[in-house]
Amino acid sequence: MDGSALGGAASGRKAIVVGGGIGGLAAAIALHRRGWQVEILERAATFGEIGAGLSLWPNGVRALDALGLGDQVRERTLTETEGGIRDMTGRWLSRTDVQELERRYGPVVAVHRAHLLEILREAVPATALRTGTEVSGVGIDGPQIEVRHSAGTSRSDLLVGADGIRSVVRRSLWPGHPDPRYAGYTAWRVIVDTGRPLTSGGETWGRGERVGIVPLADGTTYLFGAASAPEGQRSPDGELAEMRRRFNGWHAPIPELLAAASEDAVMRHDIYHLPPLPTFVRGTTALLGDAAHAMTPDMGQGANQALEDAVTLAAMLAAHPTIESALAAYDRRRRARAQMIARRSRLIGTVAQWSWSPAATVRDWVVRLSPSASILKALDSALTWSPPTPDATGADRP
């Protein structure tokens, strides 16, 4: 897809994107293809992330299609063939009708996070990427935004804060907003190669603990675990040992995956969410992704919502005569939707983490009795999103 397919040109205006993750790179691609000069400031020395996979839901795949990258992603992904929720013995509580889901909304594809970042990075001009550049603050310099960082100062017409849940941009321009809040559980993530590709994924719910399995196209498996625990804890004998203590007694193939995992591949992160912001924009600055609406991973929508943000932001900038009016339209379109999905995700996570046995037993019983059609219907609001289409008058419409 060429730039004309994404909307009008930007007449050489400059945008600074703080953060080189999925949302930041996607925003840079969308803006560049509309004629913006883009500078990406990323504090890490290299772009990329190891040890994690993700599911791209149909709404996220449509966003990638709008960027002209959908086919590249599909080539490197495995379309999920089976999923749902099980109990610790392996009994299915709810089985996802993957064929019906695809018929209604489009395919769900699983991808290694590093592979998606590579595809996004290659679509950005090499001269736009500035790694090892840590932003320290943001200010106003006349009509432009001034970004102070470890390599000096940069100025731009537009600033995109895509710098994650601990966003410096958000702290600079939304100084009174509450800090991210601990969700009450911690998570482990690891990519495992057993030499035996899997075709069945999904989650297993226990009592205050969960395990998720996501098969990947290269034959490896993304394994994650979650457990209710105090904030900031770490296992004294290693996180893999902690995972094995907690999950080795669960159903196959969880013990096999844990046996094949290596300690240096395991990542552990406490899970946080961001209290809702009153606005995603301030002047000629827009927040997107985790900087705007960091959510728990319980709907698998974090990266997908960041992709939606990026595509919508660029579309609104093409549809409106000024940056300010475009950002106001972006905020109208994105804030209510992203915050709704964040609330639902947090609710799902709370229920999934129930540790009191009677409550968890009732939860499992309700899930088992819920018709597959009703579970799919509950996904409508998240999965039916499509990229906005600016009309000839400059107004935005769904």
Image (spheres, helix red, strand yellow):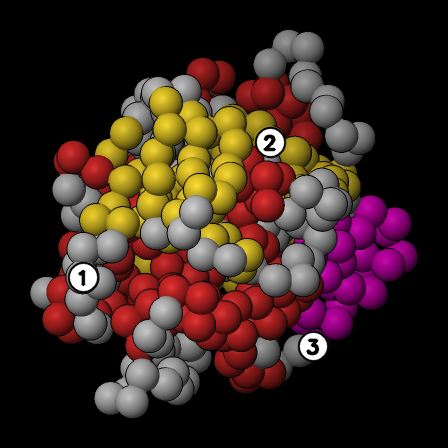
The residue indicated by pointer 3 is: 369
Which residue corresponds to mark 2? 269
Numbered tag placed on residue 288 in the rendering: none
Q: Is 360 included in the stretch rendered in magenta?
A: yes
Task: Indicate the secondary structure of the residue bearing disc 2.
Answer: strand
Q: Which picture quadrant has residue 304?
A: bottom left
Closer mark to the observer between disc 1 and disc 2: 1
Q: Residue 11 has which mark?
A: 1
Foreground: disc 3 or disc 2 = 2
Give how far across and how far down residue 384 sits, in percent: 43, 79
Q: Give x and y (percent) for residue 216.
A: 32, 46
Residue found 50% across the figure and 37% down from its top: 138
Q: Which residues are magenta?
A: 345-369
Where the N terminus falls, by quadrant? bottom left
Q: Residues within 10 Å of mark 2 (few under 14, many from 20)?
A: some
Q: Is residue 5 left or right of residue 346?
A: left
Q: What whole-number distance in Å separates the C-alpha atoms at marks 3 and 1?
A: 57 Å
Decide which of 283, 127 is in the foreground and name it.
283
Q: Name the main secondary structure of what is drawn in magenta.
A: helix
Q: Classify mark 1: helix, strand or loop.
A: loop
